[in-house]
Amino acid sequence: MSANDSNALAALVLEQVTRAMLKAGRQAADDAAQGKEHPAGLALAYYDALDVIKEQVQVCGYRFGNDLDAFDPDELLLRMAPKRKV
């Protein structure tokens, strides 16, 4: 496997892992917004990991090249907030 192939494979794996973490983090944050304690801790763990991924991707100058470029880990914190009834 060439270096270019290895880099492309690593990028693909990073994108798939990031996408899976974002999906699971969103679910945990939504559950936390309903007052569940365990999902709140889980959502914060996903937030921390996704924040590091986002930071390192930016430092390296890498672009996912799809909708993942726009993801913001802070979204999980906002989703965790209890929903107000109007």
Image (cartoon, rainbow, N blue to C red):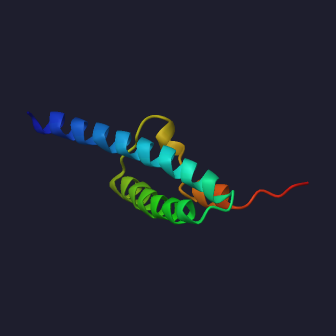
Seen in the picture, residue 51 relative to 26 is either above or below; the reply is: below
Q: How far across and how far down the image is residue 20, in percent?
A: 42, 43
Q: Residue at x 43, y 42 (%)?
A: 19
- Residue at horizontal 65%, vertical 55%? 79
Task: Identify which residue is drawn at 57% across, 63% down.
Answer: 40
Residue 47 picture location, percent across and down: 50, 60
Q: Is residue 6 left or right of residue 14?
A: left
Residue at left offset 53%, top offset 59%: 43
Q: How many labels were placed on the picture?
A: 0
Corner quadrant of residue 14: top left
Write down the quadrant of residue 56 in the picture.
bottom left
Q: With respect to residue 43, does 21 lie above or below?
A: above
Residue 23 x/y as whole percent: 50, 44
Q: Residue furthest right?
A: 86
As rendered, which of 50 and 26 lies closer to the eye? 26
Quadrant in which the N terminus appears: top left
> Between 42 and 18, which is closer to the camera in this rendering?
42
| Residue 70 in which image quadrant | top right
Residue 10 located left or right of residue 30: left
What quarter of the picture does the C terminus occupy? Answer: bottom right
